[in-house]
Image: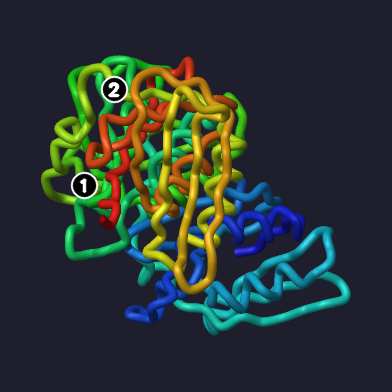
C-alpha cells in the first residue's frame, strides 16, 4: 500500500471513523482503525461490534493494500501534523505503516487486515432515502429519551418505522415518550419496523451535515442490521431484537382540560432557572396555570434547605385552572431538543401525562409523566 492524501482530509476521516473505535479492550484489534485502498480512495473503518463506520478519504493511490493500526495513537499523531500532503506506505513483511509529512516521519506497528471484522457496505439500491437535515432533526428530537438502563434493551433503542412515504421514530423510558414523523424521499413497499440503538443514531446525527442531500437507508434482508449511507460515510448498526411497547397507549386522547401556548425560549429559560432550585427537591417543578391571571403561567421550585424561585411566563391559555408538577430535567430536555419558536403544553389534570407539541406541526409530540405533589 502506498497512498498520498491531505492531512486535513485524513484527520477528518479519522475523526468520523474513530467514533466507532472500541474502548473496552475485549478484542485488541477493535482498538485499531482499518486502512484500505478502494476505488482510488483511502477507506477508513472502525467498529465496536455495535456500530461500524466506513469513511472514504480522497487520495492518490500508487499501490493497493490494507492494514490496521492503533486508532488513538494514529489519530492523535495525524491531528498534530501540519496541513498538506501526507504519504502512507506499508511494509507488508513487518506490518508497519510509514507515515511521512515533511519534516515529520513515524512508523506504526499494525495488525493484519484479515483479522478485522467485516463491515458491510451499502448496496446499490437502498430501502429508502431521507434528507440529511430531516434525519438529523428527528434524531435530535427523539433519541435522547431512550433509556441507558440495559435491563430493558428495547428501551435503549428507537423504534423506527418505514411505511409508504413516511418514517416514524419513537423512543420511550418509564417516564416520557417522544415521537416524530417525517416524509421519505422514496416510498417503501409494505411496512418495516426496526429498533435501532439510540447511541447508533446519535453517531449518525454527528456525521451528517444539515443539508437537503439524501441519506440512503438500507435494512438488511434478515432485519439484523441497518446501514446509513452517504457518498463519504457508511454507518452500520446492529438492530435490537425484541418487542417495543405499544407507545400509542400512553398518548392522551381527546381534548385536553388545559392547553397553553408559549414561546419556547421563554419557557426553556424559566425551566432552566427553576431547575437550579429543583435539583435540591427531587427535581420537582410546579406549573400553576390560571387563565384569569396575567401572566397566566407560573413555574416554581422550592427547596426547603436552600430557597425557592418563581418565574411568570406569558402564554395563551384555553381551559381550566390547574397545578401540575414535572421532573425539571425531563421538561428541560424536551424543550431544549426543539428549534420551533412556539410550543403548546396540553394538560389533563394534576396526575395526567402532559403533552408538549410544536404549534403548527402535527408530526411531533412529547409525553411526560407528572410528579405527585406532596400534600
Mark positioned earlier in the residue sequence (1 or 2): 1
* Disc 1 versus disc 2: nearer the observer: 2
Q: Position of residue 357 (x, y in %)?
A: 41, 27
Q: Which residue is mark 2?
A: 256
Image height of 290 relative to 119, above or below: above
User: In this image, 154 relative to 280: left or right?
Assistant: left
Image height of 308 relative to 234, above or below: below
**Badge 1: residue crowd in 10 Å (few <14, some 14–19, many ≥20):** some
User: In this image, 347 relative to 340: left or right?
Assistant: left
Q: State the residue in front, 222 or 97.
A: 222
User: In this image, 343 relative to 365: left or right?
Assistant: right
The residue most toward the left is 243
Pick the quarter of the image with the N terminus: bottom right
Q: Position of residue 233 (x, y in %)?
A: 52, 45
* Residues tagged 1 and 2 counted as in contact (Cβ below 8 A): no
Asked whether residue 135 appears in the rendered view, the answer is yes
Residue under the point 56% across and 33% down? 264
Q: Which residue is mark 1?
A: 224
Q: State the residue in front, 194 or 40.
A: 194
Q: Examine the image and state in which quarter residue 355 appears.
A: top left
Residue under the point 67% across and 74% down? 76
Image height of 180 relative to 7, above or below: above
Q: State the residue in front, 232 or 178.
A: 178
Pick the quarter of the image with the C terminus: bottom left
Which coloring applies here?
Answer: rainbow
Name the secondary structure under disc 1: loop
Q: Examine the image and state in which quarter residue 31 appears.
A: bottom left
Amino acid at each position: 500500500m502506498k497512498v498520498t492524501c491531505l492531512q486535513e482530509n485524513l484527520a477528518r476521516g479519522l475523526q468520523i471513523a474513530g467514533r466507532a473505535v472500541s474502548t473496552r479492550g475485549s478484542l485488541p484489534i477493535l482498538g485499531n482503525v482499518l486502512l484500505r485502498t478502494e476505488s482510488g480512495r483511502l477507506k477508513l473503518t472502525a467498529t465496536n461490534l455495535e456500530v461500524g463506520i466506513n469513511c472514504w478519504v480522497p487520495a492518490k493511490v500508487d499501490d493497493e493494500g490494507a492494514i490496521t493500526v492503533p486508532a488513538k495513537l494514529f489519530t492523535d499523531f495525524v491531528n498534530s501534523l501540519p496541513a498538506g500532503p501526507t504519504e502512507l506506505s506499508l511494509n507488508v513483511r513487518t506490518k508497519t505503516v510509514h507515515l511521512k509529512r515533511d519534516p515529520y516521519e513515524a512508523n506504526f506497528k499494525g495488525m493484519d487486515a484479515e483479522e478485522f471484522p467485516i463491515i458491510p457496505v451499502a448496496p446499490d439500491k437502498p430501502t429508502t432515502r431521507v434528507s440529511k437535515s430531516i434525519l438529523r432533526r428527528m434524531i435530535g428530537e427523539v433519541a435522547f429519551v431512550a433509556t441507558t438502563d440495559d435491563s430493558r434493551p428495547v428501551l435503549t433503542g428507537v423504534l423506527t418505522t418505514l411505511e409508504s412515504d413516511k418514517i416514524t421514530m419513537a423512543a420511550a423510558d418509564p417516564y416520557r415518550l417522544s415521537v416524530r414523523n417525517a416524509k421519505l424521499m422514496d416510498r417503501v413497499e409494505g411496512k418495516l419496523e426496526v429498533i435501532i440503538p439510540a447511541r447508533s443514531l446519535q453517531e449518525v446525527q454527528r456525521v451528517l451535515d444539515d443539508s437537503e442531500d439524501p441519506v440512503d437507508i438500507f435494512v438488511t434482508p434478515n432485519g439484523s442490521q441497518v446501514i446509513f449511507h452517504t457518498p463519504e460515510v457508511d454507518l452500520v448498526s446492529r438492530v435490537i431484537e425484541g418487542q417495543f411497547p405499544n407507545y400509542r397507549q400512553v398518548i392522551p386522547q381527546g381534548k385536553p382540560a388545559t392547553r397553553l401556548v408559549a414561546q419556547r425560549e421563554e419557557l426553556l429559560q424559566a425551566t432552566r432557572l427553576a431547575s437550579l432550585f429543583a435539583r435540591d427537591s427531587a427535581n420537582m417543578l410546579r406549573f400553576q396555570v390560571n387563565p384569569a391571571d396575567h401572566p397566566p403561567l407560573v413555574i416554581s421550585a422550592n427547596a426547603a434547605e436552600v430557597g425557592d424561585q418563581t418565574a411568570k411566563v406569558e402564554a395563551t391559555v384555553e381551559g381550566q385552572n390547574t397545578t401540575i408538577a414535572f421532573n425539571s430535567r425531563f421538561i428541560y430536555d424536551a424543550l431544549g431538543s426543539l428549534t420551533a419558536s412556539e410550543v403548546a403544553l396540553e394538560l389533563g389534570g394534576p396526575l395526567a401525562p402532559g403533552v408538549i407539541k410544536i404549534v403548527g406541526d402535527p408530526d411531533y409530540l412529547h409525553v411526560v409523566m407528572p410528579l405527585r405533589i406532596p400534600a
